[in-house]
Amino acid sequence: MKRKIQIAIGIIAVIAIVSISAFFYMTRNSTQYAVTVTSTALQTQVTQSE
């Protein structure tokens, strides 16, 4: 049960981060920011899955 909650939180976090980075990308067009956020999100996912 705990595992399912963790996975759900991970998915929600990724969706939120992608949405936020997309918003920033559109408003400021800062590619570097989007890349930083994406790499952080990937690192978080790897940490959670271990």
Image (cartoon, rainbow, N blue to C red):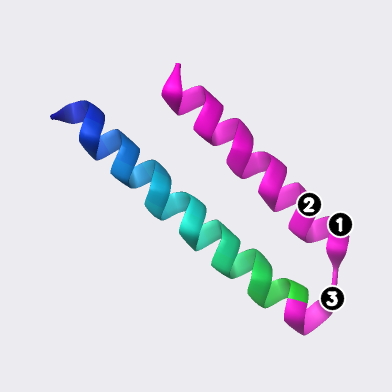
For disc 1, the marked residue is 32
Q: Earlier in the sequence, mark 3 or mark 2?
A: 3
Give the alpha-carbon distance from disc 1 to disc 2, as whole Å: 5 Å
Could you say where residue 1 lies in the image, as x and y percent from the top left? Answer: 13, 29
Residue at 33 percent of width and 37 percent of height? 7
Q: Amino acid at mark 3?
A: Asn
The span picked out in magenta is: 26-50
Which residue reaches farthest bottom?
A: 27
Residue at 44 percent of width and 27 percent of height? 48
For disc 2, the marked residue is 35
As for residue 10 lying within the magenta part, the answer is: no
Q: Mark 1 Cα within 10 Å, few/some/many (few <14, many 20+)? A: few
In what element is the residue under mark 1?
helix
Could you say where residue 44 lies in the image, as x and y percent from the top left? Answer: 54, 34
As for residue 38 lying within the magenta part, the answer is: yes
In what element is the residue under mark 2?
helix
Q: Mark 3 Cα within 10 Å, few/some/many (few <14, many 20+)? A: few
Q: Is residue 29 rendered to the left or right of residue 42?
A: right
Residue 29's tag is 3
* Image quarter (top left, top right, bottom left or bottom right) of the C terminus: top left
Could you say where residue 24 lies in the image, as x and y percent from the top left? Answer: 71, 73
Residue at 66 percent of width and 71 percent of height? 22
Residue at 61 percent of width and 37 percent of height? 42
Q: Quadrant of residue 33?
A: bottom right
Q: Above or below — where is 38 with respect to 21?
A: above
